[in-house]
Image (cartoon, grey):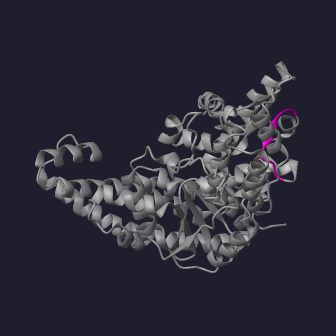
Amino acid sequence: MPAINHDTVKYKDWLATKTFDNCLLNRKQFGEFLADYVCSERDGFVLNLDSSWGTGKTEFLQRFYTELINRNHPTIYIDAWESDFSDNPLSVVASELLLQLEKLNSNIGQDFSSASRVLGKLVKGSIIGAAGYLGKKYLDDSTTTVEVAKTLLGDDEVDPKHLMKKVKEGHHQQVEAIKEVRRTLSQLAEVLKQNLNTNIPVVVLVDELDRCRPSYAVEMLEVIKHFFTTKSFVFVVATDTEQLCHSIRAIYGNDFDSTRYLKRFFDRKAVLPEPDIESYVLAKAPDFSEYQQNLNLYPKFPDDGTSLALHISYAAQSAGLGLRDLDQLIARFEACLRVANNMFLKNPTINQSISVPILLMGLIEFDKDDTRFSSRSTSKANMTTSSFNGQTPLAIRSQTYEGLTQRCLELIAIDSSEVGKTYELNDYVTEFANQLHPLNLNSSGLLIVIESIFLIENSNKVWNWDDHKKIIELSGYLE
């Protein structure tokens, strides 16, 4: 039996649902490595876990929480965004520490009561400290200073001398409180180790900091660094470091060296590995089999079971999508196919031929307000800035997913009246096959489209750009 009772931890549901074994982004190896590294630290260590917005920091931290609990380390998870409305990050961190550590075992005893008393004094002292900070900030405006002090201290009459006395007292109380809280927390960690046989350090995970107000985010870091970096405690703070630097400059000015300033708060930085998009999509994508059976979704990968998921993966990586944007792309893509499938069910004699790359890249363009989406037309359907020159219609400009999309756009823009004059079927199929080969695509579904255009096959409805555009715009109503 583990020393930590899993039924008592605050986020016990994660222990079953959020593990590195079921991580869709293949981050188990990194998670275990980081746990080894963090658990070997002891004395007030603060790690910056850096990754841009939408790359799965929260998913990782939730699984990291499970990993650490399973390793018998008391672990605290704090969602900074949930308390962004507060003006006092000090009380947020203090209360979460008390709440979550108490849940581990309610029989810690006198040491826990002592920690509660100390942290309570700390929160009270922070109010006086805030008065001192604001008094300094508005020093040139004595009226403002007094009004701020009235609000914070609750005094009906505050004169400048009384205010300065309060500020001095508050500063002294805070310095003493910092020493006391560090000492008490270290003792509490030792008590947990002795009474519950837990491992140390206690690990505190701080999430969603980059979503907070700039001032609150910086204050949270100040609180962690000055009050809670103590023996037997380790903090892991998930940030979008670039965005956090912008937040700091928003407070101190554009010329402020925010990168250097930020390093004051952290002992080390770890960069979260890029997510395995292909594995994620293969696991998250819905069952597309009905759509693939009823619709001609071209071009196809050899395995029909994974064909559309691979298309989504290629498009997402090509556009540099984060996980939140990727989830939305999957949902809207399926919505488009659902509508197209209903068209087929209403009139099964007409085969609907839909270009998967055009649909996906169009959805991405629409979501990003890309001007190419609105300016493109069926007669001029180029995805890229280069235009169709009429001489080598399938000259390979790029063996990429964008290049494939461009080929598909050029294909559906062909005027059937020009067939036999400018375009020859065999040459076209050969050239397009050259484009498909590097991406491991086959030409089975594509041949239907090409033959429909060149042979004017009326039983097959080949979607032009305007058809794709219309359904994409309708899907935009989904959030």
Q: Residue furthest top?
A: 346
Question: Residue 105's quadrant in the figure?
Answer: bottom right
Horizontal arrangement in the rendering, residue 90 relative to residue 67 (left or right):
left
Quadrant (top left, top right, bottom left, bottom right) of the C terminus: top right
Report the front residue among 127 and 120: 127
Q: Position of residue 336 (x, y in %)?
A: 71, 32
Report the front residue among 407 and 426: 426
The answer to whether any part of residue 106 appears in the image is: no
Question: Residue 246's quadrant in the figure?
Answer: bottom left
The total of numbered circles placed on residues is 0
Q: Which residues are magenta?
A: 294-301
Residue depicted at x 70% and y 44%: 423
Q: Position of residue 280 (x, y in %)?
A: 74, 55
Residue depicted at x 58% and y 56%: 320
> In the rendered image of this protein, does residue 343 appear above or below residue 238?
above
Report the front residue among 225 and 362: 362
The answer to whether any part of residue 470 appears in the image is: yes
> In the rendered image of this protein, does residue 474 appear above or below residue 254?
above
Q: Position of residue 369 (x, y in %)?
A: 49, 40
Question: Residue 125's quadrant in the figure?
Answer: bottom left
Q: Residue furthest front?
A: 421
Q: Position of residue 269 (x, y in %)?
A: 52, 73
The reply to whether the magenta stretch includes residue 297 is: yes
Report the front residue among 365 and 389: 389
Residue depicted at x 77% and y 41%: 450
Quadrant (top left, top right, bottom left, bottom right) of the N terminus: bottom right
Horizontal arrangement in the rendering, residue 309 relative to residue 248 (left or right):
right
The reply to whether the magenta stretch includes residue 171 is: no
